[in-house]
Amino acid sequence: MSNETIGSVEHQVSGLTKLAGEFTRQSSDEQAHNQQLLEIASLLLPTYGNQWNMHSLVTLKRQSLSRILYYNELYRKIIEIPGVICEFGVQWGATLAQLINLRGIYEPFNPSRKIFGFDTFEGFPVVDEKDGGFSNVGDYAITKNYAETLEKILTLHESFSPISHVKKFELIKGDASLTIDDWLEDNPYAIVAMAIFDMDVYKPTKTVLEKILPRLTKGSILVFDELNCPHFPGETRALDEVIGIRNLSLRRFPHQTYSSWAVFGE
Ligand SMILES: C[S@@+](CC[C@H](N)C(=O)[O-])C[C@H]1O[C@@H](n2cnc3c(N)ncnc32)[C@H](O)[C@@H]1O
């Protein structure tokens, strides 16, 4: 396996490798197996026929299944909490798509559960010294104009669940530290039932958390994807400065490394 096929190795920290702007803990064997699976999956995809989506589960990895199970657990916690879901840090939309599908499963007749996704869709716009020197501007960037493709994908996902003529998601493009102000003004009704912080870095996490606090109710779920994470120290710092780590009962899911969640007000 050459580095060309798996992306360039830019940085190594505490057993992690940074490949094309994203951290991974995969060994070289795992990277090779990952690439083999990708090659097989790419060849198979056009051959599955009408049930392609179901059949493509044959190449879904344990790690991806764990992520779905995690969000399944989290979604079930907000069913009795009024309000919208905000995901800060969307990237390719893997989590946003699952949230739309979980809504279709658990709350098919709740059009008030709108789902908002905030991202630059151009990677990190800013990093701070509190991010510890591990991250760079532009990390986690995706392909150009991807937000338009994601809009189509999410619209299709909505079409497979009830009340699909009502659009119940919105992508907000730009630096979330800035777009959050307009969002709060444009959505004065919105209570935030679940806020997912997955921007990884200090500054936007701190700013957005500060600004949405008044829209949380006791029982809202706060989700942090990189807490207690050596290579993304900024997320822990941001939470500590805004709410205080000791003021939340943080919990983790056994199959996610750095993800933590807490019930606000408990
Ligand atoms: C780890 S990815 C998110 C992954 C996604 N939540 C998922 O589960 O697939 C981090 C994302 O945060 C975004 N991000 C970082 N800083 C941001 C900021 N200030 N404003 C908006 N998005 C930001 C990046 O563009 C990147 O797409």
Image: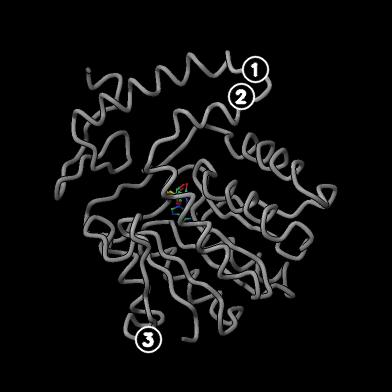
Q: Residue 49 carries which label?
A: 1
Does residue 249 sit above or below 193 in this rendering?
below
**Residue in front for this viewpoint, 107 or 13:** 107
**Residue in front for this viewpoint, 197 or 80:** 80
- Name the spot of residue 39 as percent of width and height, x first: 40, 17
How many marks overall?
Answer: 3
**Residue in front for this viewpoint, 104 or 193:** 104
Which of discs 3 and 2 lies nearer the camera? The answer is 2
Amino acid at the residue labelled 1: Gly
Which residue sits at x=46%, y=70%?
Answer: 207
Q: Is mark 2 on a helix, strand or loop?
A: helix
Q: Which of marks 3 and 1 is nearer the N terminus?
A: 1
- Name the spot of residue 209 as percent of width and height, x first: 48, 72
Q: Circle 2 is placed at which residue position? A: 52
Amino acid at the residue labelled 3: Asn
**Residue in front for this viewpoint, 126 or 256:** 256
- Name the spot of residue 218 as percent of width and height, x first: 56, 85
Q: Circle 3 is placed at which residue position? A: 247
Amino acid at the residue labelled 2: Trp
- Mark 2 and mark 1 in contact (Cβ < 8 Å)? yes
